[in-house]
Image: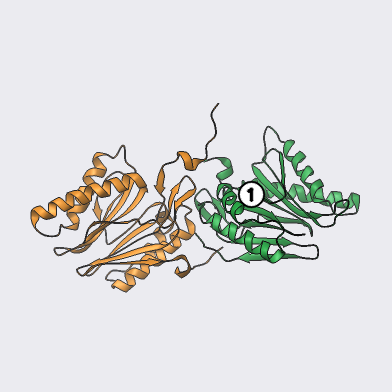
Chain colours: A orange, B green
Amino acid sequence: MEVPQPDWLTSEHMTGTSIMAVEFNGGVVIGADSRTTTGSYIANRVTDKLTRITDNIYCCRSGSAADTQAIADIVAYHLNLHSVEIGEAPSVETAASVFREICYTNRESLMAGIICAGWDKYKGGQVYTIPLGGMCVRQPFSIGGSGSTYIYGHCDATFKENMTKEECKKFVLHALALAMSRDGSSGGVVRMAVISAAGVEREVVTGDKLPRFWEG
Amino acid sequence: MSIMEYNGSAVVAMTGKNCVAIASDMRYGIRMQTLAADMRKIFKMHDQLFVGISGLATDMQTVEQKLRFRTKLYELREERNIKPSVFANMVSSMLYERRFGPYFIEPVICGLEDKKDQKNVPFICTTDLIGAQCFTNDFLVAGTTTDQLYGVCEAMYKPDMEPEDLFETISQCLLAAVDRDCLSGWGAIVHVITPDQVITRELKSRQD
């Protein structure tokens, strides 16, 4: 007889997620929530979904935790080798291209929605989104993950061209707080990183310091 | 996703020294989306009897209405309040009437009743969706967060707690458990029932 098992024993780890990245003049601001789920059990409530690819390029991961971790490791390997070959820091477009190659070729087997963002000296701050099917497109800002569906309107209404770094950080923080409040598979803390010519500054905004909006 | 996880909820009841407490989360959601953070899942039947209902929200509302109806009829006929243990039997038989097409809920009944030689004895009881009763004298849990609640309650519960201590314990257990469940949270409410009063407090919690 089949013994009924709780779903946290049999489900895959998913990063339900709300992720976001915004370009500004001089760099990018990236942000993510920190919840990893197995079914409806929260396996990790302080996950770091902002993964380093190189010192100047990071990616935001959503979808299957295993798939995105494996892909990020492979891309980091390729970029590391490439940077030795060309003798300088790799470009963000190259990283996005490697992500796209892996995600498109293995599209049937993977469940990975990735936002690749960083700074390089050729084109400055860039955000590339590589959603489920494996396409790759550059956008001034990009949102992803299950929580992003709740904030499309908010982001379209709030985004302005030529925002400063501080305005971008506030934009990311508010959008992610709203998404985390509505989406069951997003929550925890907001992790943000600012990538620019000067390097990476990471920051964590804990639950008590998150902006609170109307709560029905 | 099973039908019991369509809405999501966390309900816990604990006994203390001549007092009982019952607590629940306040989330109203549909699958992973949260629609409101002010949903009541614990209902007062009379000053010494509360029932918390977890499971499918529509059945939660229907069963609450039917129970309130039957309790009021009992009070009209008997001219006294229904005892928690009698109420629990009523819940059980009402759910079993629907054995092959059940209400998708798990109720937690909690109150104080007078026994032969003692007054204000704590009473807690839960049933499954078809009315199988479970009595204990420490704590009971229901909803989508049961695995987490069992863990924290087992660790933090001690017998014969005073009302203030009981409030503190049940609140911390609930808040810690819902932090590990996507489908519950978004606020919490706690009722502590003592022989002379009921203290209701809403807890400020994470809204994620």
Question: Considering the image in quadrants, where does the N terminus of chain A appear?
Answer: top right
The relative height of residue B101 versus residue A29 in the rendered view (above or below) is: above
Considering the numbered disc 1 on the image, is that residue within a helix, a strand or a loop? strand
User: Which of the 4 image quadrants contains residue B98?
Assistant: top right
Residue at image point 47% right, 55% down: A183
A58 to the left or right of A123? right
Question: Considering the image in quadrants, where does the C terminus of chain A appear?
Answer: bottom right
Residue ranking furthest to the left? A86
Q: Position of residue A211 (x, y in %)?
A: 45, 69
The relative height of residue B165 versus residue A74 in the rendered view (above or below) is: below
User: Which of the 4 image quadrants contains residue B157?
Assistant: bottom right
In front of the other: B152 or B52: B152
Q: Which residue is mark 1?
A: B141
Does residue A2 appear in this view?
A: yes
Q: Position of residue B192 (x, y in %)?
A: 71, 62
The relative height of residue B74 versus residue A173 in the rendered view (above or below) is: above
Does residue B185 appear in this view?
A: no
Residue at image point 46% right, 38% down: A10
Q: Position of residue B76 (x, y in %)?
A: 88, 52
In front of the other: A125 or A135: A125
Residue at image point 37% right, 70% down: A170
Q: 10 Å neighbourhood of mark 1: few (<14), some, or many (≥20)? A: many
Q: How many marks?
A: 1
Q: Amino acid at mark 1?
A: Val
